[in-house]
Amino acid sequence: MVRRAAVGTGGAGGTAVKGARRPEIRLPPLEPFTEGELEPDGDYDGLEFREADLAGQDGGGARFMDCALTGCAVDETRLHHARVLDSVLTGLRGVGTDLAEVTLRDVEVVDARLGGTQMHGAVLERVVVRGGKIDYLNLRAARLKDVVFESCVLVEPDFGGARLERVEFVDCVLKGADLTGVELKDVDLRAAAELGISAGVERLAGAVISPSQLMDLAPVLAAQMGIRVEG
């Protein structure tokens, strides 16, 4: 079961930003997953996947409802077009996981250690990504609504062509983020521990940043506008 909580509207300097709604997930008693390997279009309801080796398996199109995945290996696991609903994913680790066009709704992702994860075309709604480190996350053309990245490290995430609405970055390190063609609405970057943008800085309309972040981004903004700054 899940109860949804709304974060109140915040603002600074007269700028109001709608806060992301976070999921409050209450899992029912879970049964251990004992069926061996994932199956394409499988239906997994009320299951606990604990320390499962899912590397290289194909769960494309599968549905996970009221599930807990804890300490699972997901190297090159194929979950293309899967749906993950009202679930908690803790300590996932792997490289090259295929989550393209996945739907995550009312989900917590905790302490993930992932690299090269493919999530282009994904839909994320009421999702919290807390802790961990994700390298080279591909979120091109994805749709994120009511998403919080909290106390995690994102190295060179690609948001190219994505749409972000009510997305917060809280104590989150963003290194080399690609915002090319992104659409932002009520995106709050003020609490990011580090904000590094490699491309698309001109697409920050619709986001709010702090004065110190503006100073840090000034050289990139000046270069984008063709302004020469000389001492």
Image: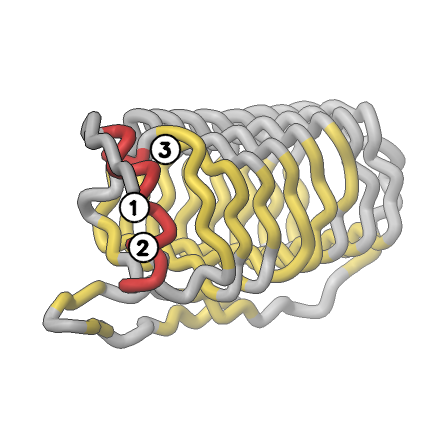
Element carrying mark 1: helix
Percent coordinates x, y for residue 212 in the rendering: 34, 62
Q: Is residue 170 visible?
A: yes
Q: Is residue 46 visible?
A: no
From the viewer's perspective, tell me whether residue 229 is left or right of residue 21. Answer: left
Residue at which label 3 appears: 179
Residue drawn at (25%, 51%) of the image:
207
Query: Which numbered circle lies on residue 218?
Result: 1
* Number of other residues with Cα within 10 Å of mark 2, as a class: few under 14, some 14 to 19, many 20 or more: few
Residue drawn at (29%, 26%) of the image:
181
From the viewer's perspective, tell me whether residue 96 is left or right of residue 16. Answer: right
Query: Which numbered circle lies on residue 215?
Result: 2
* Number of other residues with Cα within 10 Å of mark 3, as a class: few under 14, some 14 to 19, many 20 or more: many
Percent coordinates x, y for residue 116 in the rendering: 66, 29
Which residue type does callout 2 highlight?
Met
Element carrying mark 3: loop
